[in-house]
Image: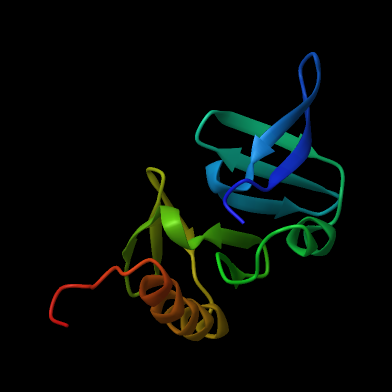
Amino acid sequence: MDNLNLLLPGPTGHDFVPVSAVQYIQSNKKQCLVVTTSGEYTVYKSMRLIASQLPEDQFVRIHKRYIVSLRHVITLGKAGLFICGKNLPLSRWGRSELKRLSITFRKSRDIVSPGQ
């Protein structure tokens, strides 16, 4: 799954962007902002369509407007989570999904969190 790519519109055409480089996706009505380690892409597709192209075990919807990559989450706080220098909102449902998937993600990557 680490070699999976998304085809995203860039300034000079379309770019193949590795899924592992996607940090988060923000929905704004009819367009989505895909934030990657190398830049940002505006995509005129629904959040649902973009999410269907992502591995379900590596990405989680944390809010009605945000999907994040588990590999890029830095801190989980009470009101949101910190990723890529930005604090994103976190719904109650998103928090429980994030916790559930992060346990599976850590086990698959042999990552142990402090205190375990």
Q: Nearer the viewer, residue 1 or 98?
A: 1
Above or below 79: residue 24: above
- Residue projecting furthest to the left: 115
Name the quadrant of the C terminus: bottom left
Q: Residue at x 62, y 47 (%)?
A: 19
Residue 11, position as x, y percentages in the image: 76, 17
Among the 4 quarters of the image, the one containing residue 58: bottom right
The quadrant of the picture occupied by the N terminus is bottom right
**How far across and how far down the image is residue 22, in percent?**
58, 45
Q: Residue 43 lies in what quarter of the image?
A: top right
Residue 14 horizontal/vertical position (percent)? 81, 26
Residue found 55% across the figure and 47% down from its top: 20
- At x 39%, y 80%, the residue is 103
Q: State left or right for residue 24 relative to residue 9.
A: left
Where does the image place residue 107, in percent across and percent down from the top left?
A: 37, 76
In front: 91, or 12?
12
